[in-house]
């Protein structure tokens, strides 16, 4: 199920796994394969990950492992996705997806390990269930943006219908995600990604008619316009979308702190002010404000 100890480093490098984690993953492979309970859990999670490959929202739960499992527990889900790799690559090939897009999509595993190290100071994955989207054929990296195959929900579908758009609740859509460590969110890079997405999904998923792009992100909080110039990348990204009201309006201060500063538990008073975005997020919180998730769409 797993590559041999000799083969594993090359597989990990193809997935952009940080170099400092590779020796641990190779060294712990034998312990994992020799532990009946760990092997049982590995088999179960791999089977759940690859079952119904390509079907949205059908993956298993990825429970957090006890802290006493140590480094093996921290890296356990990396082994799950490495074991699932041949299955998702076969699925990509069956869809005619180019190797370059497949490789860049699956290499997001290593990026998320870098995000974890920045936030927690050690190896692991903050949200293994998120990485399962890549390894189940639901999400693809196309240039600067990621696109997840999804369907319009009740609120978003109602908003598109009210606007006279052809797509309705339950119709396919593409949910946009903005990855870190990918350079500026420039309008030109976003335009290119959206063009790539139109062509990619029409060619490789012709049975799904994607007429709508959606986004659910703190980057769509309209309050950002109070702090950022009109020609900033974030404001120009916001202006692509028609915002939708009616979602829960609970504050979500920790999410922008996590994305901008790396650690959601960092005290507000200690947040640096090096960039315009850092100043916007931190100053708003220091002045007693809160951040909220935004929800928007635009026709493809």
Image (tube, rainbow, N blue to C red):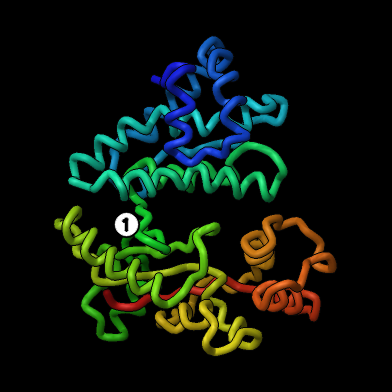
Q: Is residue 189 above or below residue 31?
A: below
Which residue corresponds to the image point at 58% horizontal and 14% vertical from the top-left? 31
Q: Is residue 72 above or below residue 20?
A: above
The foreground one among 253 and 21 is 21
- The N terminus sits in image quarter: top left
Q: In this view, does 107 lie to the left or right of 196?
A: right
User: Residue 58: horizontal and vertical position, in percent?
Assistant: 36, 43
Number of dots carrying numbers? 1
Q: Is residue 2 above or below residue 74?
A: above
Q: Is residue 56 above or below residue 236?
A: above
- The C terminus sits in image quarter: bottom left
Callout 1 environment at 10 Å: few (<14), some (14 to 19), or many (20+)? Answer: many
Q: In this view, does 231 lie to the left or right of 167?
A: right
Q: Is mark 1 on a helix, strand or loop?
A: strand
The foreground one among 98 and 35 is 98
Which residue corresponds to the image point at 23% horizontal and 47% vertical from the top-left? 97
Q: Name the residue under label 1.
A: 149
Which residue corresponds to the image point at 68% horizontal and 67% vertical from the top-left? 253
**Viewer can see residue 170:** no
User: Residue 176: horizontal and vertical position, in percent?
Assistant: 40, 65
The foreground one among 173 and 71 is 71
Which residue corresponds to the image point at 37% horizontal and 48% vertical from the top-left? 57
């Amino acid at each position: 199920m797993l590559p041999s100890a000799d083969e594993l480093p090359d597989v990990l490098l193809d997935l952009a796994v940080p170099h400092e984690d590779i020796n641990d993953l190779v060294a712990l492979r034998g312990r994992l394969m020799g532990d009946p309970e760990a092997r049982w859990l590995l088999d179960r999670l791999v089977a759940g990950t690859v079952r119904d490959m390509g079907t949205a929202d059908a993956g298993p739960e990825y429970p957090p492992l006890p802290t006493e499992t140590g480094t093996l527990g921290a890296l356990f889900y990396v082994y799950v996705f490495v074991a699932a790799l041949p299955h998702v690559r076969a699925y990509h090939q069956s869809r005619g997806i180019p190797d370059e897009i497949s490789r860049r999509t699956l290499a997001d595993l290593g990026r998320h390990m870098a995000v974890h190290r920045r936030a927690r100071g050690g190896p692991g994955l903050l949200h293994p269930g998120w990485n399962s989207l890549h390894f189940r054929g639901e999400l693809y990296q196309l240039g600067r943006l990621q696109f997840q195959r999804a369907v319009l929900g009740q609120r978003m579908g109602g908003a598109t219908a009210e606007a006279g758009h052809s797509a309705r609740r339950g119709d396919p859509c593409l949910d946009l995600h903005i990855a870190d460590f990918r350079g500026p969110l420039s309008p030109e890079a976003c335009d290119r990604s959206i063009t790539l997405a139109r062509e990619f999904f029409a060619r490789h998923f012709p049975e799904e008619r994607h007429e709508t792009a959606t986004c659910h992100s703190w980057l769509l909080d309209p309050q950002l316009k109070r702090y950022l110039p009109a020609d900033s990348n974030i404001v120009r990204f916001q202006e692509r979308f028609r915002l939708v009201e009616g979602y829960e309006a609970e504050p979500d201060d920790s999410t922008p702190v996590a994305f901008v500063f790396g650690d959601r538990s960092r005290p507000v008073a200690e947040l640096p002010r090096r960039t315009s975005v850092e100043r916007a997020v931190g100053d708003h919180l220091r002045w007693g404000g809160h951040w909220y998730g935004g929800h928007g769409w635009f026709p493809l």
